[in-house]
Every structure is written in structure tokens, then in C-alpha cells.
Image (cartoon, coloured by chain):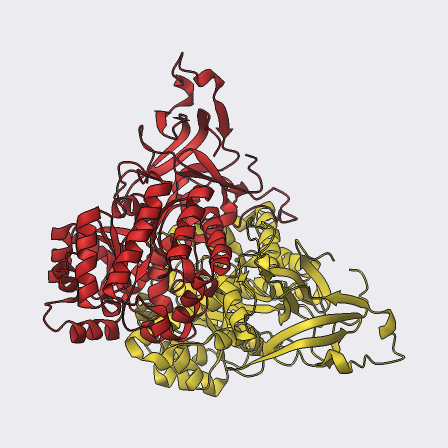
Chain colours: A red, B yellow
């Protein structure tokens, strides 16, 4: 990887000040040093004072054109990298039959490393192109393929949590861990691999990944709890996604007080645990999650696609839980977190239709979940999710172009957002969230490194 | 407009055989004659017999590349062309405050013809780029701007129903018809203009457009009913979109049995009437609509965005109603009917979560609503919406590209659908519907005329 240069980013920047408020700086200047960290932020071009005598005179300059702005990179807190070839393919299924019909057959093919290479290269390239600078990946049970995913993330420069999936029951025999011992051995092997390629987990972090409670014997859950305690490595799993799944958990773990209690009783409910879905959680369970400081990944597109239900995000937030967004490819149909922000807004409106308008999320809140919220979920709120001095430059350049006066022809290189002139910042941002796509993400940086660029933006 | 050539379209074609079944022809050959009509369809390349001695030897050839296919053009049965600059802009509003906050201020600016020219050129170009070959447009109350929209549709070659909006109450005084007399005079002027530019309504059809019952005095509704009777011109309006709106109608028309009865009692519920939304309709109202053979435009994105409610499409279909899809820009955030098919699938899943899984629509059904259903809604089922000999060639070329074996780099000219190889047709189509966008529509024809092309496809 090439050494980085000091770089100064000039132009409007936008990030989330609080859950409900954006901080829009129309005339920003952000200096990023060679280590990829933000060295200074100047909010007014008229009074610009780039630090003197530290080499900033020689810095590269990246300027926003037209109606664009810099925005923090998106954080996808839940995505199955291995399921990417099935994006959009789920028919009328619901969770448990979807797993058997679509998911296990695909995932099991990742014993072939060439298949894994093709898919993983593609999913990392695509998520980067959508502005995802950090992703929490589920891989498969296969050690070589999981390690390859870690390698690909590192080589392409995406910040990632990479999890080998643990499962030793309720899947085809050819696609499950043989025993608790092999499950732990293989998970440890994937942890060791990341330690080798990124000793301080600067970019890549291994993550302990019991698929979900029904997939794991109590013995394996116990051992995974110990693995977490021993290594300090974070945990990701699913919870309360679908009613039959919840009933199944009750049946499999009759001694547990709740689904949440299952994870808690095995030492898997910790401040480093990411729980995907959280649709059917009692107040007691939400309280327990809050007490343990575990985190929530909200996956609205997936929940609608599989008719799983509607997560009550307003309630989760009001109960003090930490929430980020997840694409949940391929339960979710798209690898775009921008689309997920939109889906979160829409799901909240469906909740509002039955539970009252306070359930509605705003554009600002959806963007908060996609950035700051996600950063909290992955335990990196001090490093990513916003623009502050000392934080990493994990960012995207969003470009919005103005419809020309003549408007006779579409410029096909330009994204779908239509700026007619005179739009205020709030309107521009809303247009981006509702009508934008990857064409509006011209460039993406992780830790100061340019990891994606397209069209108008020349690196 | 240049004279058309005989053209032979070679490659897979897909269209809807019935509500629930696609007809996929992997080796198709479709001949389109100079009048833009389908002259012959051959289903098997091995036995191809292009008609002899009729000049087909000299025909132009258009071939599908890779994983593409020809598909009927989409039909947008409800779109406010004038609201396009507000796509994505609605905040947390619901229908009645949305009209006052966002919509009336924008629409009233169309008294300026330069504004209208810029917006209308753009919306027609954009909808064509999304594969919309027929659109039912609401314009504004302004005659010159409405006529300009008709001119632009004709010049760009989009089949369109163009309606001057009638409203003489419940909007700002500067943005409403002065009286019933001026409302009818102005509507007649727009009808006359279309008669002048397209005497047989081959491409452009005027449409009588009372905004919705609350916007129109009983006098105007009466006169519009007479206008319909006198001219035979079709009608479009809104119905039962939002609960406060329904209550308002009851209050304004206390003598009416129902919202549907309001339109019926003024002679506005006919086989040529398109009713947008239809969320809150009793069984009796649905029966009345069926009896009158009026049509339904389902606008799922808009209904979710404005928290209007969820239309029960399965029930409407089971009750024998004719249903198409509408983007309802800018209640709806996107001018894409493909996105609308996706939203229809998602809304049907939200309905299914409360009312049972039979409410779920399938990909095939959503595509039917987007094509054949829409054709029935606009009264052109014998001419558009599918591929049959004698029908018009209103079609799009859909291109899907395969992820290369190396998959190292994204080809940014290519659409977002990911084909990994080996996908069956049903899977390809599902991927297109869920993950595709305008980049996957390489070319669009209306009545045999190429009206849009991009990227890979050279006209």
C-alpha cells in the first residue's frame, strides 16, 4: 500500500451533530495527515488558517465541485458477504424456509475458494462503491474462504469485521461445524489469521459469529462465550427476527427466560455484541440489552423482504439502546446503506401507521443510524462516523449535479439526484437520501486512503 | 420525426402471460414494421421464418447482448409532472399539509413557461430513461404549461395522457380556477390543443383532471362530468388516499353515500376513469367501481412516504378491479416504475404481516401491474403492455451483465444487477426487479421509435 500524503479537503461537509441534527458546514476545510487522521477542521474559508510550518503547504488538495459535499462513510453493521449472489432472490419465503431454500446451498459452495474469491472481491468492491467504509461481515463456516475475505478487505482498504459463521445444528450435515471442538478451533484459526495480517486490528477485526441460537448447541454457545472472554474479540449474531424463530428458540432453550436471556446465559451478551434485527423483544429484553450495553443492527429492507416484521426503532432508541443500520444482504436486496436509510424511514412510517406518528424517523435520524449509530455499534465511535479532529478520514464525496437550463439531454455519467437550483441544504440532503444511489458517491476514503472513485472524480 | 424502418429484434423477450405467469422466450425474433406495430413473432431461432418478399430482408437488426431481454415498456398510471423538482422532499408531512407546504407553492410557479419547459423536458427524459413508455401526467392549472407538456411528450416520443389540473377551492387563491366557467374553458383549451397536435390521440391524449373531490366545487364537478360526456376524454383523479381526506370528503359532500359515490353522482365514475390510491374503500365502493369498470392506480411509494396507508391490492384484484402502478411523483420519491414494482411487493408484505400471507404479491404480479395492468388502466390493453402481433412496439431493452471471472474492477457503465452465471430466468428477473435501475434499461422504443438509449446500446 502506497504511503499517504497530507491532504486538504475543501468544500462543504455534512455530518451528524446529534441524533436529530445535521451539522452542515458550507465552506469547510479539513486537513488529513499521513496517518489518515483528521488534523484540523476549519469552518470558514474567509478565515482559513492552515497550520504553518508542518508541511501543509505541500499537501494535496481535493475540492468539491458543484453541489457536492463530504459525508462520513457509511457503516454496515450486518451483511452476509457470502450471500451476495442471491441479492434480490427470495421469492415469497420467510426466514426459516429461506435459509434452507436459498441460503445454505449458496453458502456451502464457499468450500471452493475460487467461488469465494469471485464473490468476495465483488461484494467488497460494490459496498465500497456505495460508500460503505466499514462492514460487519458474516462469511461462511469455511476457514480458508473467511480468511480470504479478511485479505480482500485489507487489500481493498475497507474497514471490516470478519466473522466465520459457527453452526453445529439445524443445517444440512455437509454444511455445519462437526463438533464444538472444530467450531472453536476454526473460529480461533480465523482470529489468528487476522492477528497475522493486522496485529492491532487497525483495519480488520475478527468477530465471533454464532449464526443464531437455533443453529448452535448449548455446548458450542458455552465455548463461544469462553472464546469471547479469552480473546476479547467482538460477537455478532441474530435475534428475534421472525415469530417462528422465536418460538423455536423457546422450544430449544426451555430453561431460558427469553431469547435475549439465551445469549446472556452463555456469556454472549456483552458491550461488544451486535444483535441483528431485534423485532420481537419484550421491554424486559430491551432492558437487559441496555444493561449489558449490547448493540442493535436494524435491517429494514430484509425485514420487509422476508415479511419478518417491523423493528420498533423509536422504541429501541427511547429505551436507550444503541442502533445502527445493516443491509443484511441477501435477506436485504441491496448492499447500499443509503438505500437502507430510505428503507428505515419507510419501515418507521409503517410502524407509525399503526402506532402513531412519533414512530416516524427523520432523514437526519436515518443518517445518524447510518454513521454515528453504526460507529457506536461497532465500538469505534471515537474513530469513525463523523468529522472531528483526531478521528480517521473515513469519508465519501457526494456529488449532486444541477439540471442544466436547457435540460435537453441527460448526462448519463451523473447520478439520479435532480438539483434545480435554490435548494436549501436540508432539501439537498433529503433528495440525496431518497433519490440518490452509488452514482452520487464519487469517491470513498478509509483512513485517508482512496478506496473507490468514479466518473467525475479523478483520483 | 424521421420515418421508421422495418426492424427485427433478435434475442430473448419476456412479457406477462397472465397475472401470475411470465412468458419467457429465450430465442425470440420480433419483426416491427414501419408503422411501429409488431408484424410477426417467432419463438425459436432454429425454425426462423422471416416473412419473404415484404422487404424484411432489408430490415434493421437489433440484437440483445449477454444476459439481456426485451420487455414491454412500463406504464405509469399516475404521475404529477409538475412536482418532479420535489421528488424526495416531503419531510414528515401527510397529504393535506404536504399539499400546502410543498406542492401548491411549486405547482403555482408553472405560470412561468420557462420553469415549465425546464421541468417538463427533464421529467419526460427521465421517465423515458426508466423505461416508462406511457405516462398519465397531472400538469398544473396553467393552460400554456400544460400544452407545453403535451408538446414535449410528442416531440420526445413518449405516449402520454396529459391533464390540466382542475381545482376551484381549498388551495391558495392565486393557484386555483377562478370559476367553473374558466375551469371548463381552460380544460377545453387543453383538449383542443392536443386535438391540434395529434388529431387521433395516437400518442398524446388529453385527460380531464379534477385534482380530487375536496378541491372542486359541486358545480365544477358537474361541469367536468358533462365535459367528459361531451368529449369522451378520459378522467383521472385521486380517491381515498388518507383518512383525514376521507373525513373531509364526508364533511364536504354530506349527501353522498361514500367518497366513490361523490364521483359517481357527478358522472365522473366511468370505464375511462383512473382512480389513484384506493386505500380506504369499503367493499360497497369497490363493488361500485367494478360495476362502473373504473380503473385503479396503485402508488405504493407515495402511500408509504406520506404515511397515507397501505392499499390492499390483493383484495382489489380479488374483487375484480383493474389495477396498474403509479409513481405519484412527488408524493412518491422516484419516477421509476421498476422501483414502484419493488415498492408494491414491499407494501404487499406489510399488508401480509397483518392480514396473512395471501396478500403478498409475487414478482410476476408486480410486473403484470407495471405493464398489462397499466395498459388496461389507460384503456390500451389491445395496443401496449405485451408483445402480440398487431400491438405497438412499446418496449425496453434490459441489459444484465455477468460479473467477470476476475471481478477485480467494477465496470461503471454497467447496471447494478449482478449475474454470476447459471441463474435461471426467474432468478434473473427477480434480480432485475429488486436490484436493477435505469442503468439496466439500455434502450426504449415507443411505437417503434427509439426514444432513449444509453451506454452499451448504440442506436
Is residue A450 shown above or below A5?
A: below
Quadrant of res B36: bottom right
Viewer can see residue A321: no
Q: Is residue B432 left or right of residue A49?
A: right
Residue A177 coordinates in the image, percent (x, y): 30, 66
Residue A300 coordinates in the image, percent (x, y): 33, 60
- Residue lying at 41% horizontally and 65% vertically, measured from the top left: A107
Viewer can see residue B26: yes
Looking at the image, which is closer to me, B430 or A192? A192
Q: Residue furthest top?
A: A53
Q: Is residue B398 left or right of residue B209?
A: right
Is residue A459 shown above or below B367?
A: above
Is residue B225 shown above or below B94?
A: below
- Residue lying at 35% horizontally and 47% vertically, measured from the top left: A193
In what quadrant of the picture does the C terminus of chain A appear?
A: top right
Looking at the image, which is closer to me, B174 or B120? B120
Looking at the image, which is closer to me, A289 or B261? A289
- Residue lying at 43% horizontally and 36% vertically, measured from the top left: A70
Residue A333 coordinates in the image, percent (x, y): 43, 62
Quadrant of res A43: top left
Q: Is residue B191 left or right of residue A239?
A: right
Residue A275 coordinates in the image, percent (x, y): 24, 57
Amino acid at each position: 500500500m502506497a504511503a499517504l500524503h497530507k491532504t486538504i479537503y475543501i468544500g462543504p461537509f455534512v455530518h451528524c451533530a446529534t441524533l436529530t441534527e445535521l451539522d452542515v458546514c458550507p465552506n469547510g476545510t479539513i486537513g488529513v495527515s499521513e496517518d489518515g487522521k483528521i488534523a484540523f477542521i476549519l469552518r470558514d474559508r474567509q478565515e482559513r488558517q492552515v497550520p504553518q510550518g508542518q508541511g501543509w503547504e505541500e499537501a494535496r488538495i481535493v475540492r468539491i465541485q458543484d453541489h457536492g459535499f463530504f459525508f462520513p462513510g457509511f457503516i454496515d453493521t450486518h451483511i452476509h458477504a457470502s450471500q451476495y449472489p442471491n441479492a434480490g432472490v427470495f421469492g415469497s419465503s420467510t426466514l426459516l424456509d429461506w435459509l434452507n431454500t436459498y441460503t445454505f446451498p449458496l453458502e456451502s459452495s464457499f468450500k471452493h475458494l475460487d467461488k469465494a474469491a469471485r464473490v468476495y472481491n465483488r461484494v467488497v468492491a460494490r459496498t465500497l462503491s456505495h460508500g460503505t467504509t466499514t462492514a460487519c461481515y458474516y462469511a461462511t463456516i469455511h476457514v480458508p474462504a473467511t480468511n480470504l475475505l479478511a485479505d480482500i478487505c485489507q487489500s481493498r482498504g475497507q474497514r471490516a469485521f470478519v466473522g466465520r459463521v459457527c453452526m453445529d445444528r439445524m443445517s444440512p450435515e455437509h454444511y455445519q461445524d462437526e463438533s464444538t471442538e472444530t467450531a472453536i478451533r476454526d473460529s480461533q484459526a480465523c482470529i489468528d489469521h487476522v492477528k497475522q495480517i493486522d496485529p492491532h486490528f487497525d483495519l480488520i477485526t475478527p468477530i465471533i459469529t454464532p449464526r443464531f441460537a437455533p443453529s448452535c448447541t448449548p455446548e458450542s454457545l458455552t465455548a463461544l462465550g469462553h472464546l469471547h472472554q479469552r480473546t476479547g474479540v467482538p460477537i455478532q449474531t441474530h435475534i428475534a427476527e421472525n415469530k417462528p424463530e422465536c418460538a423455536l428458540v423457546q422450544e430449544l432453550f426451555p430453561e431460558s427466560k427469553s431469547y435475549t436471556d439465551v445469549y446472556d446465559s452463555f456469556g454472549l451478551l456483552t458491550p461488544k455484541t451486535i444483535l441483528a434485527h431485534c423485532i420481537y423483544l419484550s421491554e424486559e429484553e430491551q432492558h437487559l440489552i441496555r444493561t449489558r450495553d449490547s448493540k442493535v443492527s436494524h435491517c429494514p429492507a430484509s425485514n420487509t423482504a422476508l415479511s419478518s416484521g417491523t423493528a420498533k426503532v423509536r422504541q429501541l432508541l427511547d429505551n436507550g439502546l444503541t442502533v445502527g443500520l445493516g443491509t443484511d444482504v441477501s435477506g436485504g436486496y441491496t448492499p447500499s446503506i443509503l438505500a437502507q436509510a430510505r428503507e428505515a424511514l419507510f419501515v418507521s412510517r409503517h410502524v407509525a401507521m399503526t402506532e402513531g406518528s412519533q414512530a416516524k424517523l427523520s432523514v437526519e435520524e436515518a443518517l445518524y443510524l447510518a454513521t454515528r449509530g453504526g460507529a457506536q455499534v461497532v465500538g469505534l465511535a471515537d474513530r469513525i462516523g463523523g468529522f472531528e479532529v483526531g478521528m480517521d478520514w473515513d469519508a465519501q464525496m457526494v456529488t449532486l449535479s444541477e439540471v442544466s437550463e436547457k435540460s435537453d439531454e441527460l448526462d448519463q455519467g451523473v447520478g439520479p439526484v435532480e438539483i434545480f437550483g435554490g435548494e436549501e441544504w436540508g432539501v439537498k440532503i433529503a433528495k440525496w437520501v431518497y433519490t440518490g444511489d452509488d452514482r452520487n458517491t464519487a469517491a470513498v476514503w478509509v483512513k485517508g486512503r482512496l478506496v473507490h472513485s468514479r466518473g467525475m472524480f479523478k483520483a
